[in-house]
Image (cartoon, helix red, strand yellow):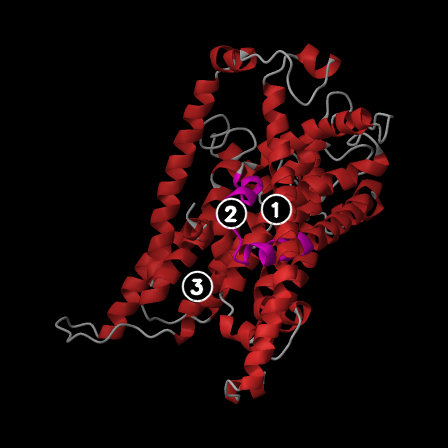
Amino acid sequence: MQATQATPLTVQNEKAWTKLTKKRGARNLLSIIAVYLIMFGVAVVVIFPIYWMFTISLKIPREIYRLPSLIPENPTWENYRVLIEEKGYLTNIRNSIIVACSVTVVSLLVSSFAAYSIVRFKYRFRGLVGRIILLTYLTPGSLLFIPLSIVVARLHMGNSLWGPDRALHDVLDPPLRPGCSPATSVACRQT
Amino acid sequence: VCPDLLLSHPGAALPATLEIEMSVAANQGPPVAPSTSRLSWSTRQAITGWLLVIPGLFLLLGLVAYPFFFAIAIAFTDRVVGQAGSWVGLDNFRYLAKNPSFIKTIQNTIIMVVVSDVLKLVIGLGLAMLLNQAVRGRGLMRALIMLPWAMPGFVAFLVWKLLFMPIGGAFNLILTDTGIHTEIIDYLGEKSTALPAVIMATTWRGFPFWAISFLAAMQGVPNELYEAAKVDGASAWQRFWDITLPSIKPVILVVTLMSSIWTANSFENIWIMTQGGPSDATMVFPVLAYFGMQTQRLGEAAAVSVAMIPALLILVFFVTWLIQKED
């Protein structure tokens, strides 16, 4: 590699180059076919599970268990009707939207402030602060749900949007922590 | 599809963070403006800087640091729901060491992390190499392979539960219809197949993060290196081994570390697919801790999750040491 940096493009070099590219011609077609075959395989692996879930959603239980098939024979939207009309789907969606929006707003605000501070201002322990934020990102989530559930119970937020059932662990904590770090990184990159 | 959009996905952006945050000390502030206030420039810098970073630190203190130490404290008590309990020293850990479920949990976690990491490394590297070439449709592929990572975890694992169902599941259907295997297998219900099945689903969900991170790193490798190597007659394998791998090594290390931590801590995959069964064949730390919480014995439950801290610390320090050695 060191030699090529200084080597001028001599006739010999040029010959070697055309030989190289000619040899690649035949091989190219094969490798292109191989690449597309692999890409097709990957696409199937990614899409098939999602397709399977969708077809199941169009089947009634009898068809799922009695007549299993890759393509639903009597597709029906009945499951979706039950979901929306009888299962309180709209309430769930409303809850999700409220939680997602508020978490996004809070973490965007907090983490963009923090990122701007770390990148733009000079003060002692600035590097340390960055490292601490990173370290909290690596803290195992499974360690936190027991204490957080105790905290939630203590604050009597158990059955509210602040901490439904499986607690703050699900609602506040994971979105906020990853939220802090990637947003920091994005802000860092842009500056 | 805009590749930039994909590359700015939070997951993909992460590996770069580490380097940036670690090199932060080298960054210089903006030029000094003539000061009109009594405070010096550096004091004002420090005050504004701290004011901006304190809300974030405060949140992390409340949501991560406090629960973290609280969990460790609980692990040394016989706390149950409704009673604070008293200090019992190492009793909870002694109890765990004799508990067969806990031994099985350690085994399962190691197998799951190692096997799924190796699979994701191979698949991720292969896909990144593939999508790093100038082939038609690679933009579409980049978007497509993000699907498993982008969908909510519980949806992804519900999908795989449907695939593995003994009756009405896609795998059994395909195997019996094509005549490859006529007996119906209850993948998630049999001891021998449950863990491999869960690992398969976990790998499916996790590989996009690896592939996209590696792809982003590979695009940062200067093209001149490859051209020079080509002229020198280096084979494709040599170019991969001597140029690509060393260049993206830091990203590989960071991605492996983070993915190992996520996998060791993953709750959704096991909880949705097997709940740790059959007879602890897929039991992992978070699920065991959650069962402990359901039986209201918080001390023992906390001890389960605290028991994995040393292993994780070793992992974290090992990889940070490797990264610093690289620099």
Could you tell me residue B304's position as x and y percent?
Answer: 71, 45
Number of numbered discs present?
3
Q: According to the image, label 3 marks what residue?
A: A129
Q: Main SS type for the magenta part?
A: helix
Quadrant in the picture for residue A129: bottom left
Taking B99 as reference, is A182 above or below it? below
Instruction: Name the secondary structure under disc 1.
Output: helix
Query: Does the stretch in magenta take in A40?
Result: no
Query: Does the stretch in magenta take in B125?
Result: yes
**Disc nearest the viewer among 3 and 1:** 1
Residue B243 in view of the camera = no
Q: Are marks 1 and 2 in contact (CB under 8 Å)?
A: yes
Dot 3 surroundings within 10 Å: few (below 14), some, or many (20 or more)?
A: some
Instruction: Tell me which residue sits at (31%, 66%) in the image.
Output: A120
Could you tell me residue B41's position as x and y percent?
Answer: 23, 74
Instruction: Tell me which residue sits at (71%, 51%) in the image.
Output: B119
The residue type indicated by label 2 comes to Gly
The residue type indicated by label 3 comes to Val
**Disc nearest the viewer among 3 and 2:** 2
Please check whether the numbered discs 1 and 2 fall on a single chain.
no
Q: According to the image, label 1 marks what residue?
A: A39
Q: According to the image, label 2 marks what residue?
A: B137
Taking B324 as reference, is B89 above or below it? above
Q: Chain of mark 3?
A: A
Instruction: Tell me which residue sits at (63%, 71%) in the image.
Output: B239
